[in-house]
Image: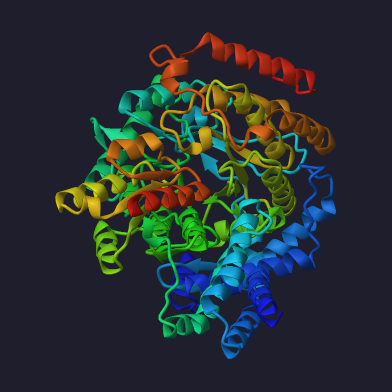
Amino acid sequence: MVSFAEVINRALTGPYYSEKDYNLKLFVPKLRETVKKYEIKYDPENVIPLDDDLAERVFKAGVELYSNVGTYCVDSHRVIQFTEAEIKEALATAPSAPIFGEGKDTKALVARKPESNIPPWCFLGACGVAVSNEEIFESIIRGYGGIPFADSITTPSLATLDGTQVRAGSPIEILACIKAVTLTRDGLRKAGRPGLPIMNSIATAVSDQAKIAGSQFGLRPSDGWLIGSMAELKVDYERLNEIAYVTSLGGHVVAETSPILGGYCGGPEGVAVTSVAYHIQSILVFRGSCQDSFPIHIRTSCNTDKETMWAISVSNQAISSNSHFPLLTIVILSSGPETEMEFYETAAQIITDVVSGGSIESPGGAKNACIDHISPMTPQWASEVAYAVTGMKRDEANEVVNRLLSKYENNLDNPPEGKKYQECYNIKTLEPSREYVALYKKAKKELTGYGLKFKY
Amino acid sequence: MKKEKIFEDLFRAIVGLDEEKGKEAANELVKEKLDPLEGVEKGLSRGMKVMGERFEKLEIYLPELIMAGDVFNSVMEILEPEILARGKSIEKKGTVVLGTAKGDIHEIGKDIVAMLLKVAGFEVYNLGKDVPDSTFLEEAEKVKADIIGISSLLTTTMLGQKELIDILRERGTRDKYIVMIGGGPTSQNWADEIGADGYGKTAEDAVSVALELISRKGN
């Protein structure tokens, strides 16, 4: 595979473009050309399409797109380009079963296929949503550590440290990152799972230096360093600095990618193809151990709407059928904790991801935008649904997802924010409110009626 | 009839993203000695309004919105000297300086706000992402801004919005500008808490709030 040193070299010497020209004169026209050439067409009737040929075409289109547009470095204004031969070599030699965690919680993250009988990797927790203080942070980590199907943890970010608000780029960011790591390790130890991997490194970190400094206080090479691409297909020096550090450490990069529906990708077809291009970028530029993808809708700021879920299903099928490099999908809900809609949205997205060949990063609630609007119930429900649909056929799943969509899609523009963690849980005993438990039981009963086979 | 056709061609140039057609129509307008301001209003601005509405319904996507803005700017290079030569000027709603807070590299949402503000008739100076407070202040001073808009997508960068307002207060220039905020984790409550004048939940919201605040300032 092309070395990371060569990637850096290309970031410094590749073809020069202004950012606007890269967006509008290279990325957008090439994307539209490939979507047209490969006849990729959105089908609103089938959120989970049963069309293997479509998945094949989307994969080929994504490879062709990436060989044409590469990755844009916003600091050098140069394009990191790869030939189709280099891309094929990268796909053939990418990691296939990276091992995360320690002790009893050591486990290989294995790539899946559509309709696979292998349970998805359950990367569960907060999706980086901010919590207001250290007490809530530690409590919710204990809650996540108690979820039976958890394979790894996604931590919240810490909004304050000792009562002072955390400001990105200031020294307090570094101190808050250190605190976030120590709180997470403590919380997981108290939950009885000290070896459980933290897979989104330090959500509190915005800058490269804070993430690297914070990691010295308890992150392990067997954890995952979440490093995000910029939309679309862009990277900056800070992200490359993080990659340089993690690869030198022998650690795992979890390559986060987020094509925007309605943005430069255009509609669902463009998002599907760009997701495949991001898959290759995750291997070659981000030196990832897996891709963690969250396509998102520009208007609803979530990915549980029909168009985005179609794009996710098609790209998951395309990627998982053609690549052994593991793929996870991040669920971003529009609704928040202790709402009926939260259960429906979570289930719809999880079914789409899992049946289409992906693993899961569990839901961020209320568009990931409201402080403390997360709970252990949401990822627990997500993992139960994920196991309940492992092995389900795509046509059956499509019917279930359509039923679920009909229950919430009209509310996506004005979703209920739900409650804060401390309002729907006892943060000392980790017990959910009676109302929350009732909603969970109701949803479980209803989805059992739809054909889901829950493990317990 | 010729006049109506030229205005229609200007409109079509915007919605059809056809820069050459727009320039041809603008040159024709100049040749026929028609009122360039009327051409802007009945052709270009009408076209931008339609594109804004289409984007709101996602009938078009961000690239089309940006390209329409580019066609508008390109055609204005022909019409603007004519407007000035007649001793007139384009009526603008106000001047906005906007960017993403220091430390924050998210900017697509802010770019959409910038485009929609232009569509609504504001003169917009888009400072980009990861913008230091000092740059906001210098640019606002330089272009005599009415509004400073500061966006943030992270809880750890939204403090930048407060910092900017605090600096304006300390310098005794808070009343000189309308300060608007937006971005994922922000809210009306946060705007109230830090003393911002306006908050836009969505890009369309931000435009409505800007129009409302600027009209109040005018009164």
Give coordinates of residue A330: x percent, y percent: 58, 41
Q: Is residue B144 left or right of residue A139?
A: left
Dividing the picture into quadrants, the one containing residue A429 is top left
Residue in the foreground of this view, choosing between A6 and A235: A235
Can residue A185 be seen?
yes
For the N terminus of chain B, the quadrant is bottom right
Q: How many marks?
A: 0
Q: Is residue A400 left or right of residue B104?
A: right
Give coordinates of residue B65: x percent, y percent: 59, 63
Q: Which coloring applies here?
A: rainbow
Depicted B18 relative to depicted A299: above or below: below
Give coordinates of residue A432: x percent, y percent: 50, 14
Dividing the picture into quadrants, the one containing residue A405 is top right
Residue in the foreground of this view, choosing between B35 and B181: B35
Task: Spot the residue most to the bottom.
Answer: B31
Residue in the foreground of this view, choosing between A435 and A141: A435
Depicted A84 relative to depicted B208: above or below: below
Give coordinates of residue A434: x percent, y percent: 54, 9
Residue at x-position 34% and y-position 30%? A132
Residue at x-position 25% and y-position 64%? B141
Q: Is residue A163 left or right of residue A359?
A: left
